[in-house]
Amino acid sequence: MASKIERIVEHIARLEPGEKVSVRGLAQELSVSEGTAYKGIKAAEAQGLVLTRPKTGTLRINLRGVAEDGSTSLAEAARSIGALCLCGAEAARKPLPSLVVADGSETQLRDVVRRCSGSVLCLVGERPELQLAAVEQGLDILLTGGAEIGEALLKEAEKKGLCVFGSEQDSSTLMGMLNRRLAAGLPQRDMTTVRDWMQLPRYLYHDDMVTAWHRLYTDIYYDGSSCAIVDDSLKICGSVDAMTAMTVAPAIRLSEIMDKPESDGIVQEELSMEALAEKLIKGNRLFAAVTSRDGMSGFISLSDVVRYYQYMHTYRELGQIDDSVLQLSGDESRAESRFYTAQIKTLKPETNRSQYVNLMCSAAAWHAFDLLGSAVNFENGTFYAPSPLTQAGEYTISSTVMKRREQSLVLELEMFDNRTSYLKSTLTVSVVTPPSGGI
């Protein structure tokens, strides 16, 4: 038997679009308390059946889940993640557009939107300047992390016919939910290039002091690493290695100690993530500067490579991985150490080190799942390749716990055979926090 709230939602669903809905009217018509009527209206609102506007009240709306072209609609996407519609419900029958996370600068947002085809749904948190930029560009908005939008800006969005939704979830969780629940309706994007995974650039100008290096790069410093130096037009004009920056006086200008730009520390936005992994590991680098025709546009690290492999594969499912097969071997009861057999069917000479990374991440995720009882996120990682892999075949991957906390692990991994070691890695993983509300 349907509950009282379910009966209220069913009643509202039968109303004509545009018909008013009130707590008092529902309570009288359906013989329920006003508190129950209110809960029923909120449940209907969560399903996209009604819209509440200031000074207007609550109206039955025609917010259907299927877009006019038959694909998944923006309305269905919002409803599936529990987002509430703040304005523009009537326009939400459009197909689910490209997704853009606004967490950088206004310039970066405009650049990303310019590269998208068609309409865009902008995920943005408590960043009023980015909310304004999104409205000015005519973007639909999904407010994340419980962020609020100003009344004047909401009215401007409504005037432009834009959809604005709100959610308590963070941007990363919402992107995962949309990918998981609405994969068929999401725009098809490969997400395989450096552009898709790079971070905001860490600019060091040629006339900056060495103190700027300490401020931006100390957290990822290691012997032999170097960073790019740009001129006033953001073109890379030199590089400074970490050892030099750590040993000279902080007040010295970078232009006085910089060398010629290091080609292996610079990559193009269009470079594939597999080729990037190969380049960083081969050059024993933790990061690289990213450039476009407009100059330095980003910064990318080995940790971003690990995030890419986590996104591209579901590690818990045993089976084929990048034309390789990985399976547990030996005694499963040895919790702190595990051994996996990697059967590499086809070797790609131009990106064979990226195949290592893929397999190592998979082994680490399986091991961590068994120990922590949950899917995990990769926080960071380092890789060292003592010898190149020259032929397909069977190899062993070991995974050993170096440090363990309640919800995280530090794992040391190695890929080897009876002749030599091919890749060593240290990976930090942590438990994925499930979204609240059980969605």
Image: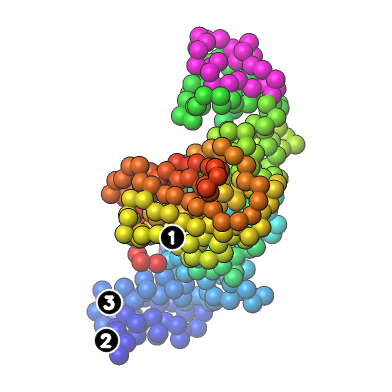
- Residue 247 falls inside the magenta stretch: yes
Q: Earlier in the sequence, mark 2 or mark 3?
A: 2
Disc 1 residue crowd, few under 14, some 14–19, many 20+, Cα 10 Å: some
Q: Secondary structure at mark 3?
A: helix
Depth order, front residue of 323/435 = 323
Estimate the spatial distance between the alpha carbons at disc 2 and disc 3, rounded to whole Å: 10 Å
User: Residue 40 sits in which quadrant?
Assistant: bottom left
Is residue 19 visible in the rendered image? The answer is yes
- Which residue position is annotated with label 1? 329
- Residue 85 falls inside the magenta stretch: no
Seen at 52% across and 24% down, the residue is 223
Depth order, front residue of 205/394 = 394
Q: Which residues are magenta?
A: 237-261
**Residue furthest front as drawn:** 418
Seen at 58% across and 33% down, the residue is 284
Is residue 158 visible in the rendered image? The answer is no
Kind of residue sitting beneath label 2? Ser
Depth order, front residue of 127/248 = 248
- Which residue position is annotated with label 2? 31
Depth order, front residue of 315/204 = 315
- Which residue position is annotated with label 3? 36
Q: Earlier in the sequence, mark 1 or mark 3?
A: 3
Estimate the spatial distance between the alpha carbons at disc 1 and disc 2, rounded to whole Å: 64 Å
As drawn, is 158 to the left or to the right of 350?
Answer: left
